Amino acid sequence: MVASTESLDVAVSHIDPGSSIAVGLALEHAIPFAAGHELLRRGIDDLTLIGPISDLLFDQLIGGGAASEIRAAWVGNVSTGTGYRFREAVEGGEIAVEDHSNFSIALALQAGAMGVPYLPTRSLLGSDIFERSELFVEATDPFEGDRIALVPAIEPDWAIVHAQRASPRGDVHLWGNTGIVGPAVGAAENVLVTAEEIVEPDVIESDPSRVAITREQVASVVECPFGAHPSPVAGYYNRDNEYYLRYDRRTESRSGFEEWADEWVYGVADREEYATLVDADLEITEPTIAAEVQYGQ
Amino acid sequence: MASSEYTDRELMVTTAAREIEDGDTAFVGMRLPLIAFQVAVSTHAPNALAVYESGVVRDSPADGFIHTMCDLPNLDRAVSTTGMVDIMSRLQRGDIDVGFLGGAEIDRYGNLNTTRVTAGDREIRLPGSGGACDIACMADRTVLLMPHEPRRFAESVEYVTSPGYPADDDGRDDRPAPGGGPSALVTSKATFGFDDSGELYLRSVHPGSEIEDVLAAFPWDVQTADDVGDGAVETTPEPTAEELDLVRTFDPDGFWT
């Protein structure tokens, strides 16, 4: 696959309704909110959302009617707890939920990335995540005889990743905690990368150890400054904590969510216009610069 | 008497912080534990290490308030920023000494529910496990944190998100998980331990609370330290001035505390 540099609306249009999408993979860091909002604007629905601790983006996609199934370990608002659109959709039977732990979703994607049907774990047994699910299987370790839980592979149609910078070829630098970005990118059929900056290939090649995703895995690369707001991006901007608290207050009711979405999603044409709505000071206060490294030859 | 000097949650943080021993590797989750680790590493446990499921590894307090483990102050000058499979693998190998967990409900054997509860005839969906199930299964010991509210104490939880001890068994030996189970429950009124059969017992009451009031919140007869031969029920030590100062430095607007 040859990556192409596209606008966000074009890149997102490659995602078909009914697709499975792994998103929010670095947990509360660098969540691809811009791509998620574009999915809503384009009305791409019937999605299966896959993630670990999935912060507000899942709640927003559910509220906007884009999701029919959730495979995740935690869905809510990390600052306040409840994601009201998630909660109402589950209680109303509008979406199906497959409950995972963070490790089981990580292992499912890791198995997908490794091309094996399942991976074993010492977690889960004794929990209702295991007992009340038909997904996981108890087995006996053929070597030592221990009881063990088997987690079947997940291979998403798409993984969407927000990163600091990428080359037009689709080689991607990202830094900070990576959560399950690696396993999800490895397991996904297609990868959409939104990046704070598109840079010359030379910049990426100067530091190959920082490359987390390479071109053959990537379908589309989109330059998308501020694409993770309200989540933080190391080196670019801090988390907009007040946004999370306001979202909590505004979206407890269905109508409140719709007013919120009219303002923040459907009321803006693109990310550039979205950025004009944000008044918080999210500037980096400790501009820590990594020491220079040499590779040499 | 207590509330005029510090809040319930400030006491919970300092009590939780004391459960981290020097040299421990602690698995730090959301909310109060974010602050508790920073207090511990700033006071009695300078050689403690924190791992976070997002991949962050830290040995020092963050320079700035953190809402979440992924906030930039928590990444800045971390020991390492890696991924979840790495962090969870350390847990699975048995390398994590202590983990922190909260929940909507707890039963007498320390099983926690963060998935769904019933209020009247209505089922309420909660956010789910996150890494809690994994920490409960695989940390050497876990410290549970919860507001002291009767609705949170259940003879049997509706959904076991994070396993404690099995009720029909005398330990966790039938499980392949390397974890040892809950070692303490810290509520807003008291601190509890778990006896040899894995049952909760009252260890200490926080200043300003009475034993009778603390026990009245439970739907079963809760054992006390006297009952299990662990001495008398004590009074939880108050936060020191240094600890309180640290809590207020790490959470300057009192968002978590």
Image (spheres, coloured by chain):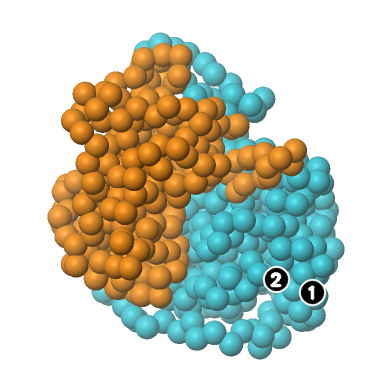
Chain colours: A cyan, B orange
Asked which quadrant contains residue A123, the reply is: top left
Tell me if residue A105 comes above or below residue B107 in the rendering. below
Give x and y (percent) for residue B24.
21, 45
| Disc 2: which residue | A250
Residue occupying image coordinates x 41% and y 43%: B213
B132 left or right of B33 in image = right
Give x and y (percent) for residue A65.
81, 57
Mark 1 surroundings within 10 Å by alpha-carbon count, few (fewer than 14), some (14 through 19), many (20 or more): some
- Using the rendered image, report if marks 1 and 2 lie on a common chain: yes
Residue occupying image coordinates x 82% and y 50%: A46
Kindly report which numbered mark, 1 or 2, lies closer to the viewer in this rendering: 2
Number of marks in the rendered image:
2
A220 left or right of B27 in image = right
> Can residue A212 be spotted in the picture?
yes
The residue lying toward the viewer, choosing from B255 and A69, is B255
Q: Disc 1 vs disc 2: Cβ atoms closer than 8 Å?
A: yes
Tell me if residue A181 comes above or below residue A164 in the rendering. above
| C-alpha separation, residue under disc 1 versus residue under disc 2 | 8 Å
Q: Quadrant of the N terminus of chain A?
A: bottom right
Q: Earlier in the sequence, mark 1 or mark 2?
A: 2
Tell me if residue B167 comes above or below residue B29 in the rendering. above
The kind of residue tagged 1 is: Glu
Asked which quadrant contains residue A220, the reply is: bottom right
| Disc 1: which residue | A259
Question: At numbered mark 2, what does the secondary structure look like: helix, strand or loop?
Answer: helix
Question: At numbered mark 1, what does the secondary structure look like: helix, strand or loop?
Answer: helix
Residue occupying image coordinates x 73% and y 57%: A85
The residue lying toward the viewer, choosing from A190 and B126, is B126
Give x and y (percent) for residue A107.
51, 37
Residue occupying image coordinates x 27% and y 37%: B203
Q: Quadrant of the C terminus of chain A?
A: bottom left
